Image (tube, grey):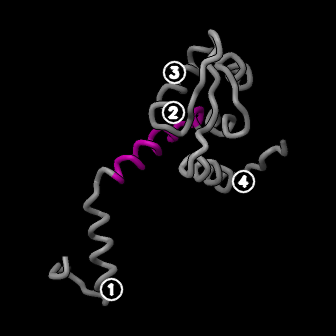
């Protein structure tokens, strides 16, 4: 990496090598792209934002969003698979909530800052 020849050298030296090393980890960027792809849908952003504030079942989510339960389930599946939400089963009912992870918190903050949404006080 130290002998890397770039078309333009701007004096960054060691920092350029570190950046180049990170750029070589395409899988890191693929993970980020997958999460953003899942949140590239208005309905999924609304569901994720709702689940940042409360834990709900499909029936309640569908009622709050004025959607059918199958439509909500359709949107929950990729969110669950890409990890911004988690679920738990209680009898026959499945409850969903935003994952309490640094990534989940960051996505929530990003949505609120970009959309200027004020969270309800709980």
Foreground label between 2 and 4: 2
Answer whether labels 1 and 4 touch (C-beta < 8 Å).
no
Q: In this view, does 118 lie above or below 1?
A: above
Give the residue pinned by disc 3: 74
* Secondary structure beneath label 1: loop
Q: Position of residue 118 (x, y in %)?
A: 78, 50
Q: Position of residue 70 (x, y in %)?
A: 56, 14
3D distance between C-alphas at marks 3 and 4? 27 Å
Badge 4 crowding class, 10 Å Cα cut-off, few under 14, some 14 to 19, many 20 or more, is few
3D distance between C-alphas at marks 1 and 3? 47 Å
Q: Which residue lies furthest to the right in this view?
A: 121
Badge 2 crowding class, 10 Å Cα cut-off, few under 14, some 14 to 19, many 20 or more, is many
Q: Where is residue 53 in the image (x, y as percent from the top left)?
A: 73, 39
Foreground label between 3 and 2: 2
Foreground label between 1 and 3: 1
- Bounds of the magenta segment: 28-44
Mark before the other along the chain sequence, 3 or 4: 3
Give the residue pinned by disc 1: 12
Q: Does the magenta stretch include residue 38?
A: yes
Quadrant of the frame with the C terminus: top right
Give the residue pinned by disc 2: 79
Q: In this view, does 31 lie above or below 8?
A: above
Give the residue pinned by disc 4: 116
Answer whether labels 2 and 1 touch (C-beta < 8 Å).
no
3D distance between C-alphas at marks 2 and 4? 22 Å
Q: Residue at x 67, y 56 (%)?
A: 113
Q: Residue furthest bottom?
A: 11
Mark before the other along the chain sequence, 1 or 4: 1
């Amino acid at each position: 990496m130290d002998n890397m020849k770039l078309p333009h050298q701007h004096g960054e030296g060691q920092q350029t090598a570190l950046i180049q090393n990170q750029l070589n980890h395409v899988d890191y960027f693929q993970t980020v792209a997958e999460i953003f792809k899942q949140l590239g849908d208005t309905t999924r952003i609304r569901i994720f934002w709702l689940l940042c504030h409360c834990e709900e079942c499909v029936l309640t989510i569908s009622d709050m969003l004025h959607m059918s339960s199958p439509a909500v389930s359709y949107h929950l599946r990729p969110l669950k698979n890409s990890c911004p939400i988690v679920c738990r089963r209680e009898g026959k009912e499945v409850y969903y909530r935003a994952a309490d992870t640094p990534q989940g918190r960051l996505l929530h903050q990003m949505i609120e800052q970009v959309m200027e949404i004020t969270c309800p006080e709980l």
